[in-house]
Amino acid sequence: MHQFHKYIDLRQNKESPFSGISFWPTFTDIMTVILMIFMLAMVVTIIKNSNLLEQLSGVKSKVVVLEEKLKESQAEENELKMNIADLEEELRSKEMEIILLKDEKEVIKSTLEAKLALISALQSDIERMKREKEASEEKLKTLTAEMEKKIEEFNKKFKILTNLLSEKEKKIVVLSAKSKELELALARQRREYTLLEEEYNKLVGPARSPIGKDVVTVIYSKIGEAYRILFKDVNSNKTEALTLNQLHNRLRSLKEKLGDRLYVKIVIPENSGLTYNEAWNFTKDILTKYDYYYQNRKRIYPTLNPPQGSNESRIRPSEGLH
């Protein structure tokens, strides 16, 4: 018979008279106990497993959170590293700026010292210039007084000269009137002389004409004190400037080449600047040496001379010699 002592008897046939002598009921009871123990263990295990699952899910969520926090921490760490690198670079830059500022400070200090020295020198120069200015002002006062005296004397002399000048101007007006009268008289004499020469030429021989001749043109004028000669060759529209010697050489060559066919046309332009005698002597010299007409009349032309007293007159355009 089973002895349960303090344990509860769970057998179904515990009241049976054969319960103490039967083997199978005892085995059944044992199996029942084992099953109950197994069921209890299973229940406990299931409960524990459910708790473990809850804890595991909680741990997983915590792990996810921790991983996210870890990632954030790594990102923050990287950002902090970058910030630290930037700060280090900025620190190095600031240190370099500090070094440069120190150098600049030294330069400014030396420049300031130089400026102070220059200011001191300038102050000395200013003092010296003030003294020189005072001396110059004294000299200027003296010179001003002397200049006032000289100006007063000059004004007196100027008045005297003005009076003399007015008298001279009156005389000049009178002389100008006389000069105009002389010029008119000379012009009349030149016209009369030209008419006489034309009449004389008509009586002596045929008139001078460029028809059938080879014509060269010589333009003679005076600019200031310099004489100007322009030459235009036979059948040419181009003029060229020549010296007097070059002109003689050119005309001499043409005379040898053309002979009696060479007609020399001399033009005295308007406002030529020549006196009548200068124009006359040049014309006479050139024509008597090279022009066909005067080559045949050398014994006659030298007797023709310009009117006397014409040195001061100027050739007018209507009085050009050809």
Image: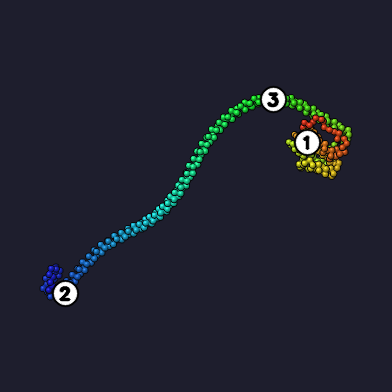
Image coords of residue 232 (percent x, y): 78, 41
Say whether residue 141 is left or right of residue 29: right
Q: Residue furthest left?
A: 17
Residue beneath disc 2 = 24
Distance of mark 2 from mark 1, alpha carbons?
Answer: 179 Å
Distance of mark 1 from mark 3, alpha carbons?
Answer: 40 Å
Say whether residue 30 is left or right of residue 201: left
Image coords of residue 4 (percent x, y): 13, 70
Tell me what residue is drawn at x 56 percent, y 33 percent: 136
Amino acid type, callout 3: Leu
Residue beneath disc 3 = 164
Asked where in the image residue 234 lies, by quadrant, the reply is top right
Looking at the picture, tell me which residue is in the foreground, 110 or 130: 130
Of callouts 3 and 2, the N-terminal one: 2
User: Does the residue at mark 1 contact the one at mark 3 (Cβ under 8 Å)?
Assistant: no
Asked where in the image residue 259 lies, by quadrant, the reply is top right
Say whether residue 275 is left or right of residue 73: right
Amino acid type, callout 1: Ile
Of callouts 2 and 1, the N-terminal one: 2
Q: Nearer the viewer, mark 3 or mark 2?
A: 3
Image coords of residue 53 (percent x, y): 27, 62
Dot 1 falls on a residue whose secondary structure is: loop
Q: Which mark is residue 268?
A: 1
Q: Nearer the viewer, mark 2 or mark 1?
A: 1
